[in-house]
Amino acid sequence: MRIPRMSLAVAAVEERFTEDEVAAFRRDGYIVLRQFAELALRDRMLAATLDGLAREVEPIEYEADLSYPGAPQSFDEAGGRTARRLKAAHSRGIAFTDWVTWPPLLERLRQLLNGPVVVPLAHHNCVMTKQPRFSSDTGWHQDIRYWSFARPELVNVWLALGPERRENGCLRVIPGSHTLALERHRFDEQVFFRAVEPENEPLIEQAIDIELEAGDVLFFHAKTLHAATRNFGTRPKFSVVFTFRPLDNPPRPGSRSASMPELLLG
């Protein structure tokens, strides 16, 4: 279901979220800030992204690595080296550090996470790249599915480096889905929410498109169900994505979530 962009939960660019905006995030599991990221900082991140793609700076996740619907099924096929994600974004240039430590961003995250903020570098910490022709569909899922923390209380921050529309694979979310207790049988063996499932269909029908312009930022809960189509447009789409947790929600020892250092931002 598509709705007009102005009917999304949208916060004005102020010093902090208002109480109503925080309440909207708690209710819906997401909120959008329009034209939040500064142009100069966006340009620096985009330049680092384009350089990393041109030189194939590892680590990179390729579409063929996952073989989702629409992607090349092997590296030997046409488009087999189409990048899906530039991983380890934090190590790709100081611009990404400047972004996650930017005071206006941190202040809002402290509101949503109720205190000091930590960046787990084991998850997201990437630039999502959705290329024309060889990109893929991502099914409905919750990001917490493979993560291991004391509690499923994390917030993702998705920064658009260019226009994001349904046609080029913008994110779709199901409002309020982060509050639901969803039984395991409603997910497949890869922990994707089953789209062809009578029990799930009424919920999926409530999905909305999060259409963004360059500089718009989507905050969404790690339990919010979301999905995206492949890029049916003619130009690449780039999005910077980081995850944040509260200080008192550590990763479980020995898990993938605890496999990399973290940034304590305070």
Image: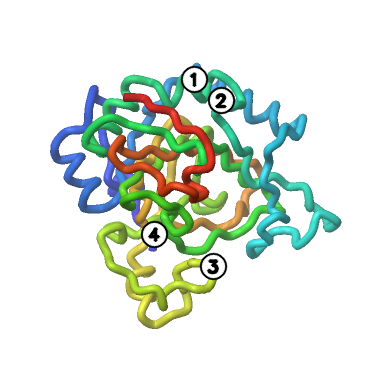
As displayed, is residue 102 above or below residue 143?
above
**Res. 230 image quadrant:** bottom right
Where is residue 151? Give x, y as percent: 31, 51
> What is the CA distance from the residue labelled 3 to the residue labelled 4?
14 Å
Look at label 4 and name its amino acid. Answer: Leu
> Does label 3 or label 1 sit earlier along the sequence?
1
Q: Nearer the viewer, mark 3 or mark 1?
A: 3
Secondary structure state at the residue bearing disc 2: helix
User: Given the current orientation, which residue lies at the most extreme front position?
Assistant: 253
**Neighbour class for label 1 at 10 Å: few (<14), some, many (≥20)?**
some
Q: Nearer the viewer, mark 4 or mark 1?
A: 4
**Neighbour class for label 2 at 10 Å: few (<14), some, many (≥20)?**
many
Mark 3 and mark 1 residues within 8 Å of each other at the beta carbon: no
Using residue 91 as the reference point, say whether residue 102 is left or right of it: left
Name the residue beneath numbered marker 1: 41
Q: Residue at x 67, y 29 (%)?
A: 50
- Here the colouring is rainbow
Using residue 141 as the reference point, say whether residue 30 is left or right of it: left
Name the residue beneath numbered marker 3: 190
Mark 1 and mark 2 residues within 8 Å of each other at the beta carbon: yes
